[in-house]
Amino acid sequence: MASIYASVALIRRNGAIVFKPPRKEAPTDGTQARKAAQRYWNGSLAKGDILEKVVLVREFNGQLEISERPRNGRKENPWVSFCRDIEPTENEAHISACVAELGIKSYSRLITPPDVLIINGVTYRREL
């Protein structure tokens, strides 16, 4: 099953950093998702816009997997990937927009243990 990614670009416009609404990417793997996102956002700039960073987000095992590719002047730096918990952050509105685009409505996707668990004939009950 292919993963669903959301990509967003941070753009410098008139001295301020802004971002356009994120878009979904549905490639076969992460490398193709990064290439597709980079191509799309490079081609979507308006006159006078400067692409600062392309960000690719997906949910994987209850966490956000984030890949970023910042620019340093005319030079594109390599992709940097990291994982973090799914939690809203005030100073990262672009990440929150990607989470919304992916349809992650709550943080209940984290694995919760069952109330009753039977292992090798032994019953374990979770106290509520």
Image (tube, rainbow, N blue to C red):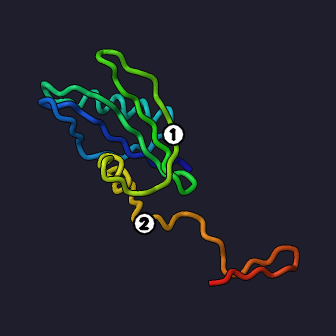
Total number of numbered labels? 2
Q: Which residue is mark 2?
A: 106
Disc 1 residue type (three-letter): Phe
Q: Quadrant of residue 119?
A: bottom right
Q: Is residue 24 shown above or below 14?
A: below
Q: Which residue is mark 1?
A: 82
Tell me the SS state at disc 1: strand
Q: Pinpoint residue 75: horizontal percent, then vertical percent.
A: 35, 16
- Single out the residue that lies furthest toward the top: 74
Q: Is residue 53 shown above or below 90?
A: above
Q: Pinpoint residue 34: horizontal percent, then vertical percent.
A: 43, 33
Q: Pinpoint residue 15: horizontal percent, then vertical percent.
A: 15, 30
Residue at 43 percent across and 45 percent down: it is 57
Q: Earlier in the sequence, mark 2 or mark 1?
A: 1
- Single out the residue that lies furthest toward the right: 120
Residue at 20 percent across and 30 percent down: it is 12
Asked if residue 92 lies left or right of residue 86, the reply is left
Disc 2 residue type (three-letter): Ser
Q: Which of these two is toward me, 23 or 79?
A: 79
